[in-house]
Image (cartoon, rainbow, N blue to C red):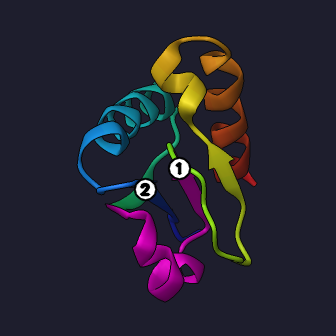
Amino acid sequence: MAKKKVLFVCATGIATSTVVEEKVIEYCKEQGIEFDFDQRNTASIQQIGNDFDLIVATTQVPYEVDVPVINALPILTGFGDKEVLEQIASVLRS
């Protein structure tokens, strides 16, 4: 089975998406889930969003895409982070 591809996005593609990316990778590694990933700014979703199996965003995604988009703000705040991490793992397992 091919590895799933995750796109991590934030407004600039640098700051908050990096924090979320690291936490998601760590969590998924503990769960035995491997995936490929990229990190970009939100605007890049228009061109490449549908090339991924999942988009994990720390900002509003103003574009229509044919893949699940998960709001990762709880991972940054620590409130509801476990639920979001489980949701991401569930998508990657399916």
Which of the marked residues, 2 or 1, is nearer the chain's N terminus?
Answer: 2
Does 67 appear above or below 86?
A: below
Mark-to-mark CA distance, 2 and 1: 5 Å
Q: Residue at x 72, y 22 (%)?
A: 83
Number of marks present in the image shown: 2
The reply, left or right, for residue 89 in relation to residue 73 is right
Whether the residues at callouts 2 and 1 have beta carbons within 8 Å, the answer is yes
Q: Is residue 23 magenta?
A: no
Q: Which residues are magenta?
A: 40-57
The reply, left or right, for residue 64 in relation to residue 29 is right
Q: Classify mark 2: helix, strand or loop.
A: strand
Extreme residue in the left direction: 14
Residue nearest the observer in this picture, 49 or 62: 62
Does 49 appear above or below 94?
A: below
Report the residue marked by disc 2: 9
Q: Position of residue 19 (x, y in %)?
A: 32, 32
Q: Amino acid at mark 2?
A: Val
Q: Position of residue 52 (x, y in %)?
A: 54, 73
Q: Quadrant of the N terminus?
A: bottom right
Q: What is the number of the mark on residue 44? A: none
The reply, left or right, for residue 62 in relation to residue 18 is right
Q: Position of residue 40 (x, y in %)?
A: 33, 64
Residue nearest the observer in this picture, 1 or 58: 58
Q: Classify mark 1: helix, strand or loop.
A: strand
Q: Residue at x 67, y 57 (%)?
A: 69
Q: Quadrant of residue 35?
A: bottom left
Q: Residue at x 66, y 30 (%)?
A: 84
Extreme residue in the bottom direction: 47
Crowding at dot 1, Cα within 10 Å, few <14 / some 14-19 / many 20+, comes out as many
Report the residue marked by disc 1: 57
